[in-house]
Image (cartoon, rainbow, N blue to C red):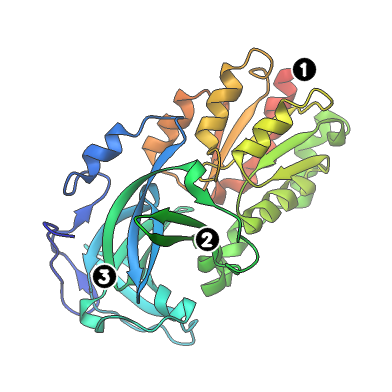
Amino acid sequence: MTGWNHEAGSAGTHDGPSVDLRKRGDGMQDEKILTEVGTNEWQVVVFMLGTQPFAINVDKTREILRWTGVRPVPKAHPAMRGITTIRGEVIPLIDLRAYLGIEPGVEEEQSKLIVAEFNRMKLGFVVDAVDRIYRINSEELDASLTGTFLGDNALYVIKREGRNILLLDYERIVQVVNPAVAEQFKMDEGHARKITASLGDPNQYKILVAEDSPLIRRLIQDALAEGGFHNLELVGHGKAAWDRLNDEEDTFHLLITDIEMPKMDGLALTRKVKESSLLKHIPTIVFSSIVAEDIKRKAQSVGADAQISKPEISLLVETVTRLLKAQG
């Protein structure tokens, strides 16, 4: 990508300029501004591993650097390259090529580093090259091979300019490389039951969950079960959730939705629910790995009743209980 100003630091450190995707970068921010809230559009950074293009949501990325060098971590996962320091902040580096078993297409010193932040964690993904930014619609995400030929690590295919670009399940990758991350998502059952005691039987309420990642769906299901909520229906994308909400033969008392999903994303889903005279009374919780302030503002602008980041899952039962009680 021409015009990007990168500067490598000494081994294991970086203090030079970079592309900050929150602020600017070769017209990228201009395009980001044009992506309206709740229109089912978002943006991805396309990068290369060998000859295969992959993508990550722009909202999960913070900056792109040249190879910074690395300090190894003993007894780590093979894809855990080690740690580096960026402007005084220590972050772990995950080599996506090693994780996916792809032969590097460049020498190590030519590798690029995508600094990402989600689930209140900042880390670096080591890749061969960064290609471009695409503005996409959630309807473009091809899920026909999800869970079968794409395996556990790739969620969708984006078809652009004759290329099949894979969108990875980054939450799952991080948890496989560092299983200790999963511990932050656990909650105490006794505490959860105390919170929901005022509701009577939590199963009198039917909750719809829209989440594309099987890993996160299980996470939500387990967390709600700790509070006694078992009357759940889980769907993999916003369009399926919208169809279920409009099914006159069923009634839902609360909606929990992710943001990044195929067919219809969570912000578009929330906007449609809140604009519907028949559905706007349903409390809606946006539950996302992306904690950025602009995402919070977007969720508020489409009418979300609450927002919870995935590391704050201990607040999920409390928030669900509060919103259901407010409904009467």
Foreground label between 1 and 3: 3
Residue 5 in sight from this viewpoint: yes
Mark 3: few, some, or many residues within 10 Å (few <14, many ≥20)? many
For the point 55% across and 51% down, which residue is it?
A: 311
Above or below residue 178? Residue 211 is above
Foreground label between 2 and 1: 2
Circle 2 residue: 169
For the point 44% across and 34% down, which residue is it?
A: 296
> Tag 3's secondary structure?
strand
- Mark before the other along the chain sequence, 2 or 1: 2
Q: Please indicate whether residue 48 sits to the left or right of residue 197 in the image.
A: left
Above or below residue 280? Residue 205 is below
Q: Could you tell me how far apart the alpha carbons at marks 1 and 3 are, in whole angstroms?
A: 53 Å
The three-letter amino acid code for the residue at tag 1 is Gly
- Mark before the other along the chain sequence, 1 or 3: 3
The three-letter amino acid code for the residue at tag 3 is Lys
